[in-house]
Amino acid sequence: MARRIIFLLFLIACVDRSVNVHCEKQLVSSFDKHDNASSSLAELFSGKRIPLFRYITNKTSRLSTKAVQVGWDRGLQTSLYVISVGLGTPAKTQIVEIDTGSSTSWVFCECDGCHTNPRTFLQSRSTTCAKVSCGTSMCLLGGSDPHCQDSENYPDCPFRVSYQDGSASYGILYQDTLTFSDVQKIPGFTFGCNLDSFGANEFGNVDGLLGMGAGPMSVLKQSSPTFDGFSYCLPLQMSERGFFSKTTGYFSLGKVATRTDVRYTKMVARKKNTELFFVDLTAISVDGERLGLSPSVFSRKGVVFDSGSELSYIPDRALSVLRQRIRELLLKRGAAEEESERNCYDMRSVDEGDMPAISLHFDDGARFDLGSHGVFVERSVQEQDVWCLAFAPTKSVSIIGSLMQTSKEVVYDLKRQLIGIGPSGAC
């Protein structure tokens, strides 16, 4: 999720919001309950591209819903990558963040005193909605079934998802039809109805989140048959320097085509965390020179690609070495350090081609050349050209964030258990 990767999943949720709706149908069947339409889902989705775009709220807090590149939110505020989907019958448009860093999907729903906007999902108006009940296999997989202590008086399955930045979403699990297009639907899709949030401002004006992780609640695991994979291209941000162009990204769910211009590395399973797609990062190089780090720095907690985290997060030791190397290069090339902001530089004297470029090296010999696009994030300072290092420290899972992934096709090939990165310019 944006700025956050899943940290603690499915804790007991003490939902004290009053759900003033009348969706009385209860989900009592097993995890595999889907109608016959789901049998051809893989064929329907294969090769289909759905517009993917960034959004930023303007002064009137209105959301751009056009599939186009919109502005870069200046400063170090987070920009989310979102797609438009439909939920329920009839389908209600939901602008949701696409998140490879978590598996549970959720949207804001109607309830007394809850967060609302014109697109808030109204359970009572969907003819196909069903609550997930305590005691069902889906509640056990995606909610807090062992903690349904009073199922007679409180039969609804609660869920809670907490994120590393301290924000959280919690509420009740529901099941309804998830729609990508007129023919691209996932019936009986289980998701969370967010009835309250911690750090709700962190979620911006999106309607919810689409979990594309590896866990049992993810879009992939809930689709029958399971898709071969998915791919996406995150559009570039705008810059006063003209570094990046206005583009529209895309998201494609279904069969993954084999391409010669995509470099792949293997996914790595971790017994203690089955919610994420891990990779075995062993080294980082800057302008072709590897940093002096042991591979164990990254392997202790693991590394993931996360479309929902703008910045990249690496262990303190790795970040310290990276900072020093970047600083040395930039000062030699004419950059000036900002006195008031650590790891920020005035780049007015640095040519675009002299920005440091980063490559990632993996245990299986793969190398992803990510260039300089995601190394820095621009900060608006009057009459200056200030850029700040787009990395932060972590004591948890390391993250290759969305800035490092921009303009490249990112491929998740689940059949071959590979993650791939294509060259810049895919969107």
Image (cartoon, helix red, strand yellow):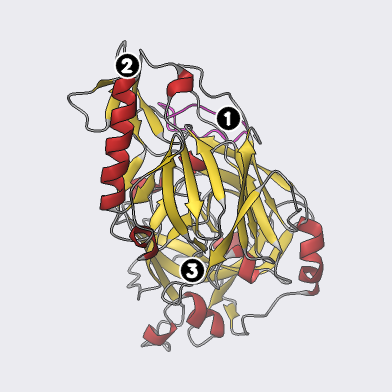
What crowding class fits label 2: few (fewer than 14 Cα within 10 Å), some (14-19), or many (20 or more)?
some
- Residue 277 point in image, percent of width and height: 52, 63
Q: Which mark is residue 396?
A: none
Report the number of numbered marks. Answer: 3
Q: Nearer the viewer, residue 345 or 68?
A: 345
- Which residue does the image show at 32% across and 61% down from the upper left? 396
- Residue 407 point in image, percent of width and height: 59, 36
- Which residue does the image show at 49% across and 82% down from the upper left? 140
Query: Could you tell me which secondary element the residue under label 2 belongs to?
Result: loop
- Which residue does the image show at 55% across and 46% down from the upper left? 368
- Residue 412 point in image, percent of width and height: 63, 57
Image quadrant for the C terminus? top right
Quadrant of the image occupied by residue 6: bottom left
Q: Earlier in the sequence, mark 2 or mark 3?
A: 3
The residue stretch that appears in magenta: 57-72
Q: Which mark is residue 275?
A: 3
Q: Nearer the viewer, residue 332 or 260?
A: 332
Q: Is residue 424 left or right of residue 157?
A: right
Specify whether residue 208 is in view.
no
What crowding class fits label 1: few (fewer than 14 Cα within 10 Å), some (14-19), or many (20 or more)?
many
Q: Earlier in the sequence, mark 1 or mark 3?
A: 1
According to the image, label 2 marks what residue? Answer: 334
Q: Nearer the viewer, residue 176 or 186?
A: 186
| Front disc: 1 or 3 | 3
According to the image, label 1 marks what residue? Answer: 69
Q: Earlier in the sequence, mark 1 or mark 2?
A: 1
- Residue 138 point in image, percent of width and height: 55, 79
Q: Amino acid at mark 3?
A: Glu
Q: Is residue 3 left or right of residue 246?
A: left
